Image (tube, rainbow, N blue to C red):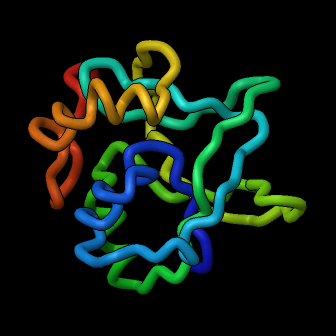
Amino acid sequence: MAHLFIYGTLRDREVCEKVLGRAVSDADLRPAFAQGFATYKVADVSYPCLLPSLGAKAYGFILSNLSDDDIGTLDLFEGVNYRRVPIEVTSGDETIMSEYYRPNELLQTDGAWDLAIWQKEGKAAFLGEDFKAEGIRIPSHV
């Protein structure tokens, strides 16, 4: 796989590198957005999901130069509630077919999710309660 659109906790360099177990270079992260999608906080946990939303734009990065081992690690981390599916994203003037992790079922959401707010208010809880290399914690409503 050439590209992965990351829109949530993986946008945080520390989290991304912890998950992958290696450094991620600036060259491997391209700012991008997905038109017609928005990032929402999943209820009962401190991570988001990306859902269709008319007129919205979800911002993130295209993460490149992923090995097959990296993909396996990311699949494990995202866990049973998410799977990789195609998505069209825009980076600069370029439209790129990528993949992203979509919820397998409709997760209950609790408002919009914002990276900067999460880094200040939710990152510690995520790293302490939700983050596991073998898969993020499943919300209680699933």
Q: Nearer the viewer, residue 39 or 14?
A: 14
Q: Nearer the viewer, residue 46 or 98?
A: 46
Q: Nearer the viewer, residue 71 or 47?
A: 47
Q: Is residue 142 visible?
A: no
Q: Residue at x 52, y 19 (%)?
A: 112
Q: Is residue 116 visible?
A: yes
Image coords of residue 27 (percent x, y): 57, 77
Height in image: 67 above or below 72?
A: below
Q: Quadrant of the N terminus?
A: bottom right
Q: Residue furthest left?
A: 128
Q: Quadrant of the C terminus?
A: top left
Image coords of residue 25 (percent x, y): 46, 76
Dividing the picture into quadrants, the one containing residue 64 is bottom right
Q: How many marks?
A: 0
Q: Residue at x 74, y 27 (%)?
A: 56
Dividing the picture into quadrants, the one containing residue 71 is bottom left
Q: Residue furthest top?
A: 110
Q: Image check: 37 left or right of 141? A: right
Image coords of residue 134 (percent x, y): 16, 59
Image coords of residue 140 (percent x, y): 20, 22
Q: Residue at x 40, y 74 (%)?
A: 24
Dividing the picture into quadrants, the one containing residue 73 is bottom left
Q: Image check: 113 left or right of 52? A: left
Height in image: 139 above or below 84?
A: above
Q: Residue at x 33, y 76 (%)?
A: 23
